[in-house]
C-alpha cells in the first residue's frame, strides 16, 4: 500500500506522483490518502494519473481514507464517477 505524506499540492506533486507510479508499477493497488492534510487541484490530477497508469497495466487502483478536502475537490470537478473512493 502506498501512502503519501501530509501534502499533495503543486509544490510537491511531481515527486509524489513519481513515487505513486513506482508503487503502481511494483503491483500495489491501494493508495491510502489518510495522512494528507494539504491538497489542491494538483492532487486531483495526480490521482487521475495514477488511475491511468494502473489501467495501462490492466489493473485498478483503490483510493482509501480520502480526506474531506480532497473529496470536496473531486466533487467540485465532477470526477466522483471516475475516481472511485473507499472511505
Image (cartoon, helix red, strand yellow):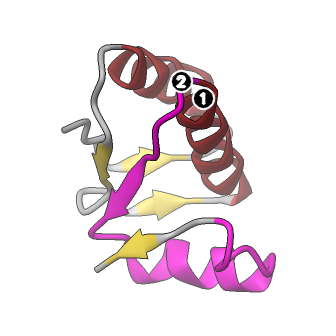
* Residue at the extreme front of the image, as rendered: 58
Q: Quadrant of residue 87?
A: bottom left
Up-down relation of residue 63 to residue 66 (above or below): above
Residues at circles 1 and 2 in contact by the CB criterion of under 8 Å: yes
Residue numbers of the magenta segment: 57-82
Q: How far from the left and from the top, in percent, is residue 12? A: 55, 30
Relative horizontal placement of residue 1, taking residue 66 as reference (left or right): left
Q: Quadrant for residue 53, please give it.
A: top right
Where does the image place residue 78, in percent across and percent down from the top left?
A: 79, 81
Residue 75 location, quadrant? bottom right
- Image label count: 2
Residue 41 position, x and y percent, is 72, 58
The question of residue 58 being in magenta is answered with yes
Q: In the image, what residue occupies the spot 66% across and 76% down?
A: 73
23 and 36: which one is in front?
Answer: 23
Q: Secondary structure at mark 1?
A: helix
The residue that disc 2 covers is: 57
Amino acid at each position: 500500500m502506498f501512502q503519501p505524506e501530509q501534502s499533495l499540492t503543486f509544490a510537491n506533486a511531481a515527486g509524489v506522483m513519481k513515487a505513486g507510479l513506482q508503487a503502481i508499477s511494483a503491483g500495489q493497488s491501494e493508495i491510502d490518502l489518510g495522512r494528507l492534510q494539504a491538497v489542491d487541484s494538483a492532487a486531483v490530477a495526480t490521482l487521475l494519473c495514477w488511475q491511468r497508469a494502473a489501467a495501462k497495466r490492466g489493473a485498478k487502483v483503490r483510493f482509501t481514507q480520502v480526506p474531506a478536502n480532497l473529496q470536496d475537490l473531486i466533487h467540485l470537478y465532477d470526477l466522483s464517477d471516475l475516481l472511485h473512493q473507499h472511505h
